[in-house]
Image: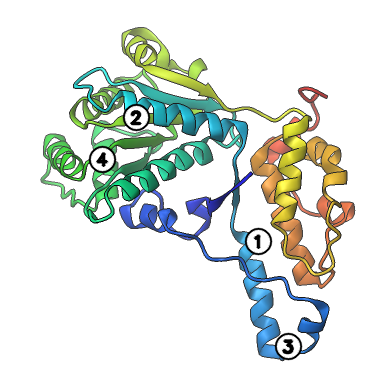
Amino acid sequence: MTTPHVLPSESGGHLSTRPGWREFAQEPPIPPALLTEHEYAVLNDADLARDTEDRLDHHTRLQVVATSTVRHTVTTGRRLILLNRHAVSARRGLIVSGPAGTGKTIAITQLGLAHEIQDRDRHPNSPDRIPVLYITVPPAATARMIAAEFARFLGLPTPGRFNITDIIEAVVGVCTKGRTGLVLVDEIHNISLTSRTGAEVADTLKYFSERIPATFVYAGIDVEHSTLLSGTRGAQIAGRFTLIPSHFFPYNAEWKALVRTLEQTLLLRRHTPGTLARLDRFLHDRTGGMIGALSHQIRGSAIDAILSGTEKITKKDLVNVPLDVAATTRTRTPQDGS
């Protein structure tokens, strides 16, 4: 269920820049080998320290799991990209919406990765292509700020003397020349159509979608319940965008598989395989079914196990890793599917 790539924000790069995106789209480092006890016994201090650091670094990387939401997003998105290939207007888009911590960013970036790899395979000798563009909507964003985010990804200057039209024209020109086919817009919930500024931001995104021959994909918190889909502007978005909900995982077969898959990524010398799988119900109760909290729980416990020298994870070790407020709050409410 794991994909061969880690979430870019965990790898040190910045998704919202072209170099950061390209770093994400490259093959990730090969995980270090887990040595036998005999092999560890003959390591000198320098090699032992290097092995420890390599394994710590491995566990800091967020291993992406191909959940049902990720698979649905990638399949739907790639279908829309094909359907939009010859469209000259009214291209269809996609919205991934749900509570915080349910894997929305992972889903859209995996779609972006799939498109990037496919484009690279189809055009291996075209390094100047820019198949994917990724931005996040800043809080209290203005139309010019959104245009500047597009420009920042592309590495275009945005001096104060440039008005928004100058920036848009520069962005459209580079994207058209670079054959950009997919635009990912994260944190879309930061736009509110109840304000004039928010309406102008929505109009700017719409204008970009009309000028850039690409499929636009939005991700945000509970978008379907926000103002983004209300009123005349919202009706236009709702009429062109497919919505995919992200969700908390119920305690079911998929959740159990998630735990097993994440446990298989562990590189701990004394950990007994299957220990976490037997604690899958406990992990669900503790994390509230949130994939982000589950990943943090397991990776944090693995790091503690290496630093403490125990090299294994027990139920007590899991409890010792504090989780985010959202996860701990959700555990106090009845769980879906429980």
Residue annotated with mark 3 = 43
Crowding at mark 4 (Cα within 10 Å: few <14, some 14-19, many 20+): many
The quadrant holding residue 187 is top left
Instruction: Tell me: 207 left or right of 102.
Output: left
Mark 2–mark 1 distance (CA, rounded to whole Å): 34 Å
Could you tell me how far apart the alpha carbons at marks 3 and 1 are, in whole angstroms? 21 Å
**Quarter of the C terminus within the rendering:** top right
Q: Return the residue nearer the eye: 105 or 265.
A: 265
Q: Nearer the viewer, residue 38 or 270?
A: 38
Pointer 1 or 4: first along the chain: 1
Spot occupied by residue 224 in the image (x, y as percentages of width and height): 49, 17
Left or right: 288 with respect to 157? right
**Does residue 222 appear in the picture of this structure?**
no
Instruction: Residue 109 in the image: state x and y as whole percent.
Output: 46, 42
Q: Amino acid at mark 2?
A: Ile
Q: Name the kind of residue labelled 4 in the image.
A: Thr
Choose mark 2 or mark 1, whichever is in front.
2
Q: Nearer the viewer, residue 325 or 244?
A: 244
